[in-house]
């Protein structure tokens, strides 16, 4: 019987180990944390957005801006419907919410974790709770895994499923990158993804705590729009956050020579002509009121001061004195509110890590290393990342399944 060691008991590792054991391998799952899948426990604000109810491979690939094409085989082997079927077979009923996000009906991430652990144990996986420190090699192959407690696990093959470096308190501290490099693999630049963004504008602090729904946003790089989205966002003390911001962040690769701007349409339901008519009605019905007071009919209270400041219109000026040209400039501001992006927020707060083991060095049909014949990879440790909404967990499940099936 072949012995396979899976390193990392997160989403990808638990699936990989279970599939390996089901195929007759003696499978050992090494996890350095006292409990499995700590990061899975906090996804979806503790509710666990397990996948996205999207079963169109082309859309799944399109929702994976970083090396999405690498995942064709993985998605084909294990689709979101397979994730849902597996969980429901394990007793976890699911539901679909806005944007195709799939959650357990219980809204408890612990139910998902318990089911995946039960699946692995029931398949015959042995769990070892200590850190994997190094590979031992013989004739160019991995012959054993050296553990932090001094033990050694001889093996016929190994898989690295250790995740990235975001949320390090859950155990994601980049261990897999070191293991991969020790086997000759290259690791691409590590940056945060699905992360809040820092902004350099002086007005940001005044908007702290402002939450917006139904806004249309554009991310521009050097003046060119590279991403559009619609939904919710939040202003923070350092910049911007929220679902549309997190997804936009996955399109930002570096802040070296590029200039990034975030364009917000506060009134996406109205085109410029319709918004102008709305302003004219408001101004006519309140002709003797001040500009800042009439804006309260149109905007959240926290936004008024900043809009007044950027419009250049005196706040105490009566609206019947505002010119057509000033009104047009105001309309442009409301539909093209620009925020200058200066950087990512702390990578420790990122939902996922962008970067990882170079996909050119991994066989996409098996998840096997092209450099070491008995080494495999799955999950976030690989250089792939997707939008928010369950897509990244599906990548973990799909690559984990393919890894476990082939190891």
Image (tube, rainbow, N blue to C red):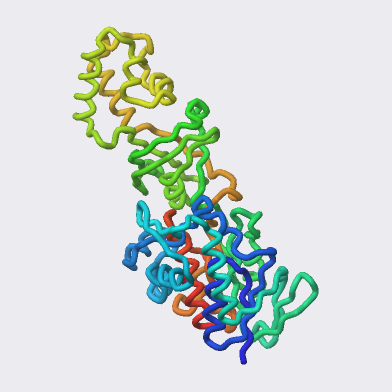
Q: Is 318 on the left-hand or right-hand side of 340?
A: left
Q: Quadrant of residue 166?
A: bottom right
127 or 55, which is in the foreground?
A: 127
Give the residue drawn at x 41%, y 39%. Answer: 262
Residue at far right of view: 150
Quadrant into which the N terminus falls:
bottom right
Residue 60's x, y, as percent?
A: 37, 63
Q: Is residue 36 left or right of residue 206?
A: right
Place of residue 69 in the rendered image (x, y in percent of width and height, measured from the top left):
39, 68
Number of dots carrying numbers: 0
Q: Kindly identify the residue that appears in the image at 24 percent across and 33 percent down.
A: 270
The quadrant the C terminus occupies is bottom right
Q: Position of residue 101 (x, y in %)?
A: 39, 56
> Percent from the top left, x then y, of residue 246?
46, 48
Which residue, as the protein is rendered here, is positioned at the far top?
288
In the image, residue 166 sits, relative to residue 161, either above or below, namely above
Look at the image and tell me whether residue 66 can be seen: no
């Amino acid at each position: 019987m072949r012995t396979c060691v899976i390193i990392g008991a997160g989403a990808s590792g638990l699936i990989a180990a279970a599939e390996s054991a089901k195929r007759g391998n003696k499978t050992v799952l090494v996890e350095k944390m006292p409990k499995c899948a700590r990061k899975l426990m906090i996804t979806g604000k503790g509710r666990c957005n397990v996948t996205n109810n999207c079963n169109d491979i082309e859309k799944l690939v399109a929702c994976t801006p970083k090396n999405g094409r690498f995942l064709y085989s993985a998605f084909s082997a294990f689709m979101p419907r397979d994730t849902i079927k597996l969980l429901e077979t394990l007793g976890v009923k699911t539901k679909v919410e806005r944007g195709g996000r799939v959650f357990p009906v219980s809204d408890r991430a612990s139910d998902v974790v318990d089911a995946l652990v039960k699946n692995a144990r029931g398949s015959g996986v042995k769990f070892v709770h200590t850190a994997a420190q190094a590979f031992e090699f013989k004739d160019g192959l991995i012959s054993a895994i050296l553990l932090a407690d001094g033990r050694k696990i001889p093996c016929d093959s190994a898989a690295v499923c250790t995740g990235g470096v975001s949320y390090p308190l859950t155990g994601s501290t980049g261990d897999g990158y070191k293991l991969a490099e020790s086997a000759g693999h290259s690791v691409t630049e590590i940056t945060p993804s699905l992360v809040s963004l820092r902004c350099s504008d002086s007005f940001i602090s005044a908007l702290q705590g402002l939450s917006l729904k139904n806004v249309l946003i554009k991310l521009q790089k050097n003046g060119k729009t590279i991403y559009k989205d619609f939904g919710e966002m939040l202003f923070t003390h350092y910049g911007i956050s929220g679902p549309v911001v997190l997804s936009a962040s996955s399109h930002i690769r570096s802040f070296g020579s590029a200039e990034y701007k975030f364009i917000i349409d506060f009134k996406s339901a109205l085109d410029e002509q319709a918004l102008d008519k709305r302003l004219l009605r408001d101004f006519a019905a309140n002709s003797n009121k001040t500009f800042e007071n009439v804006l309260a009919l149109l905007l959240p209270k926290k936004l008024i001061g900043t809009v007044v400041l950027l419009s250049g219109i005196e706040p105490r000026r009566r609206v019947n004195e505002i010119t057509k040209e000033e009104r047009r400039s105001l309309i442009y501001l409301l539909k093209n509110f620009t925020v200058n992006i200066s950087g990512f927020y702390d990578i420790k707060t990122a939902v996922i890590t962008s970067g990882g083991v170079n996909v050119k060095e991994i066989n996409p049909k098996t998840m096997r290393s092209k450099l070491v014949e008995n080494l495999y990879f799955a999950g976030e440790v690989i250089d792939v990342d997707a939008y928010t909404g369950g897509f990244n967990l599906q990548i973990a499940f799909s690559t984990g399944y393919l890894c476990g099936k082939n190891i």
